Each structure stands twice: as structure tokens, then as C-alpha cells.
Image (cartoon, grey):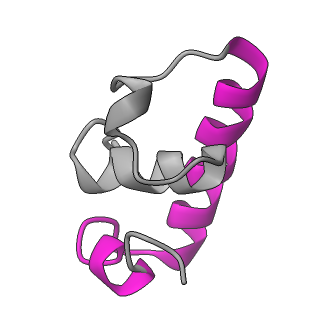
Amino acid sequence: MLYPSIDKILNIIDSKYSLVHVIATRSKQMQETHHYQMEEKDYYNKKELGRALEEVENGLIKIHKKEK
């Protein structure tokens, strides 16, 4: 089971598309740069995808919406 729950994250990010885009981008950044916003021991997940979700849940990644 994925931690944190997707339902919990969708309360923070209103769109599933936005969530997928942000998490994919951030996990790719982690794989390439090995830069994490928290100490590695503080993450529950071992893989970058889960760690990116944790960063969103902890408010370390924010989405700015473009105005039309």
C-alpha cells in the first residue's frame, strides 16, 4: 500500500493530473540529483516516488496555478 494515501494528497492538490505531473517530475529530479528536502532517515518510503508524495504531504512542494 502506498503511503501517504492518494486520497489524503488530493485534499492538498485538487487535480489528479497535477498530482501525477508534480510527483513524476519531483521523483525524476531525486533520481538524477539525489537531492532530498528532508533527511533520508525521516522518509517512510525508500523509493523516490513515495518520497515525492511525502514531500507534498509535508508541504515541501507547492503548486502555483497560472492565471488565465
In the shown orientation, is residue 2 left or right of residue 13? right
- In the image, residue 10 lies at what x, y percent? 35, 77
Q: Can residue 10 be seen in this view?
A: yes
Rendered residue at 24%/77% (across/down): 11
- In the image, residue 22 lies at what x, y percent? 55, 49
Rendered residue at 62%/64% (across/down): 20
As drawn, which residue projects farthest toward the front? 41
Q: Is residue 8 above or below residue 48?
A: below
> 20 and 15: which one is in front?
20
Per the picture, the main secondary structure of the magenta-coloured stretch is: helix
Which image quadrant for residue 30? top right
Instruction: Report if residue 7 lies within the magenta region.
Output: yes
Rendered residue at 69%/13% (across/down): 33
Q: Can residue 67 be seen in this view?
A: no
Q: Give the range drawn in magenta.
A: 6-33
Q: In which quarter of the image is the N terminus?
A: bottom right
- In the image, residue 56 lies at what x, y percent? 35, 50
Q: Is residue 63 above or below residue 10?
A: above
In the shown orientation, is residue 25 left or right of residue 68? right
Rendered residue at 74%/28% (across/down): 31
Which image quadrant for residue 25? top right
